Amino acid sequence: MTQLLSAPSDIASWDWYVDVESGEVLNSATSLALSISRVLDRQSLMELSEIRVSWHRYGQGPIGFRSLVSLRGIQGLNAEVMTERIMSSQPAGYPDTHAGQIELLGSGYWINANGERKREEQLVDVSLLVTPDDISVALGVRHDIWMWFDFSGRPHEKIYNSNKPRLSEALKEISEVLKTETIPGDPTYFATPEEDGIAIPDTFPNGLGRDEIHML
C-alpha cells in the first residue's frame, strides 16, 4: 500500500441532499450508503470494508460515542443487514440515541505516472448525516492526484488524466443514484470544487502552480 501526500482536511468536497419518509430514515440511509459504495467500487475509489457510526440524540446532536462496524466477509450484504449491524452496535446505556452519521471506510486505487495501480487507504471520504427528514451525503478528497498541479505546484498531467475522470464519473453516478444534483463545496486553500471535479487554477508564467507543501 502506498502513502500519498495528504492535506489535513478535505481539499475539495461535494454534497447531495435527499428527502426521506418519516420513520424510514435509517433504512433509507443504509440503502443509499450501499448504492454509493457500489458506485465508488466500480471506479476503484473505495472497496467498502467498515462503517463508523456516530450516535446522536434528537435535538442535542452527538453524544460522543462512535461504533466501528465491520462489513468484511458478509455474504449478501444489503440494507437490512447493514441496518441490523448498526443497531446492534448502539451503546447499551443510550437507548434513546439514533445513528446520526455514517462514515464509509475502505481502500481504493490511484494510478501513478507509469499507469500502475496503487492501493491507498481512505482515498475518498464519504459520510451520510441522518436527520428525521433528510439525509445529507458528503464526499471529500485530500490528495493532489485529482488536481492539475501537485501540492508542490508542478503539473502532473499523466496522474491527473488517469485519476480525475474516475472522480468525475463517480460524482455524476452518485447524483444519478440519489436523484438529486451535485452541490460543490466551498473553495479551500488548495482547490475550488466544480460539479465534475476540481477547477484547474491559473498557471504562473513559469508554467507552475502555487506551492502548497507548507500547508500539509
Image (cartoon, grey):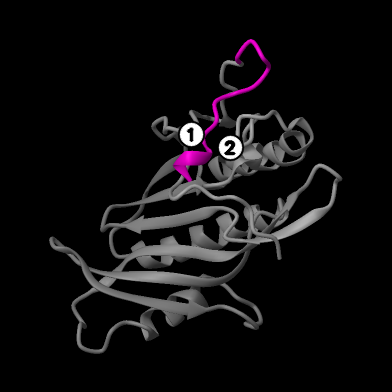
Q: x%, y% of residue 45?
A: 66, 54
Label whose residue precedes the other's in the sequence (2 or 1): 2
Which of the pair 122/4 is nearer the observer? Answer: 4
Picture coordinates of residue 31 (x, y %)? Answer: 50, 63
* In the image, farthest residue toward the top: 205
The magenta region covers: 204-216
Whether residue 209 is in magenta: the answer is yes
Q: Is residue 159 left or right of residue 106?
A: right
Quarter of the image where the N terminus is located: bottom right
Circle 2 packing at 10 Å, graded few (<14), some (14-19), many (20+), is: many
Residue 12 can be seen, yes or no:
no
Give the residue displayed 26% in from the left and 58% down from the top: 132
Q: Would you say residue 130 sits in the magenta stretch?
A: no
Residue that label 1 marks? 190
- Would you name the residue on which mark 2 appears? 151
Q: Kindly check if marks 2 and 1 are in contact, taking CB atoms under 8 A apart as contact.
A: yes
Q: Amino acid at mark 2?
A: Phe
The image quarter in which residue 73 lies? bottom right
Q: Secondary structure at mark 2?
A: loop
